[in-house]
Amino acid sequence: MTERASVVLSGGQDSTTCLYWAIERFGRENVEAVTFDYGQRHRIELDCARVVSRDAGIRQTELSIDTFEQLGGNALTDDDMEVAEGGDGELPTTFVPGRNLVFLTFAAAHAWQRGISNIVTGVAQTDYSGYPDCRQETIDALSQALQLGMDRAFVIYTPLMNLSKMETVLLAESLGAIDTMAQTHTCYEGQRPPCGQCPACLLRAKGFAEAGIIDPLVAL
Amino acid sequence: MTERASVVLSGGQDSTTCLYWAIERFGRENVEAVTFDYGQRHRIELDCARVVSRDAGIRQTELSIDTFEQLGGNALTDDDMEVAEGGDGELPTTFVPGRNLVFLTFAAAHAWQRGISNIVTGVAQTDYSGYPDCRQETIDALSQALQLGMDRAFVIYTPLMNLSKMETVLLAESLGAIDTMAQTHTCYEGQRPPCGQCPACLLRAKGFAEAGIIDPLVAL
């Protein structure tokens, strides 16, 4: 049986890199993407995910999740909350409790229906901004829950888990995906070209700088 | 610190029994319920959950999840699919992949925001209709994922896990919750009074019969 894979594609730098990683590993015709509209303030992310999928020539499914907005209390779906990094022992205001767990569970449910067992996600525990749902041990536990809960031998791939942002940029380069980075979105302020000041922009800029590669998004 | 608990309340017999179990264990003032509107065909379930919560005098939060309808492919959200039990090695058409995993993850996210660490769910592996997400080992793995993914020492209580339907009825009786069962919904056909023919009705009837207790819903 041909192995097929579904990539959780947000339209950001990391998940786009993962899409190209999956294409190299599984073959373009065996890869598809799933994108979640969870009420993110910055709708530009969804546009980016569509453009990236189209350019890559892969099937993309967009699923909406209206629940996070109802839960509220985070800066990614609430217009009136400011982006702030967490202090000592505090989570940043951009933490959406359960977000990656729900994304991966719905990605698995969608994959289940399409007969796909491999799921690829761009979470990374290096350089991570204090999100506990990006850690390998969280993914391992969830992977177990998904396998048992849907009776399917899912494998969750996390190609970026232990890469620094610099290494992620170098990986994208080795996959021929640097040009595509012009179509991705990272900025927490929702700006394009990016604001260059928010934690997400700074992390991205640091990665490109250390890799010695010009970010085509900034060069726009 | 007073321990508080959130009960995943569907409006059915099992989750209603769990609500009364939680009230006995944690105290009425420390218990609340969360109900999911996931596009279930039988909207009567939501009405039942509201009435049960009101009668019990506890706070109830209703959260909608629009994603399962988009996924489709199951008899609980698709009008045009028939309820059918699974054959050899097959899952029943009422299996919604990821449903309990998503419910518990959103229940945990909601609990996280409200400073609650105890979650109660009515899943049961005895008499279970072939749903892999109702098994204890699935719940254990998910519990681990939720704890790690949200950095909170969640405890998931499954008071019905190893009870037969008869024992669940006897538990409800010991909790003084039999009268309330008149307000619950079980029937896969969405009928009230219940159809008495579908797998869910038959299972419920068997439980009451073996317990030697008259189901107040059927006696209506």
Image: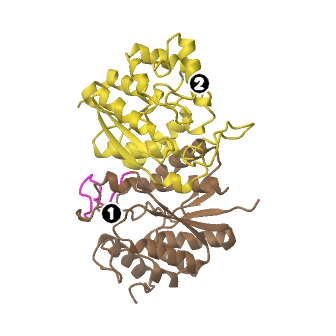
Chain colours: A yellow, B brown
Q: CA distance from mark 1 to mark 2?
A: 44 Å
Residue A8 in view, yes or no: no
Residue A3 image offset from top left, x and y in percent: 28, 30
At x 26%, y 53%, the residue is B90
Up-down relation of residue B120 to residue A64 (above or below)? below
Which is nearer the eye, A194 or A22? A194
Mark 2 lies on residue: A203
Please indicate whether residue A130 sits to the left or right of residue B212 in the image.
right
Residue B16 image offset from top left, x and y in percent: 51, 72
Asked if the magenta segment contains residue A176, the reply would be: no
Q: Considering the image in quadrants, where does the C terminus of chain A appear? A: top left
At x 65%, y 57%, the residue is B114
| Magenta span of residues | B84-97
Mark 1 lies on residue: B76
Main SS of residues in magenta: loop
Please indicate whether residue B74 sits to the left or right of residue A144 in the image.
left
Q: Considering the image in quadrants, where does the N terminus of chain A appear? A: top left
Chain designation of label 2: A
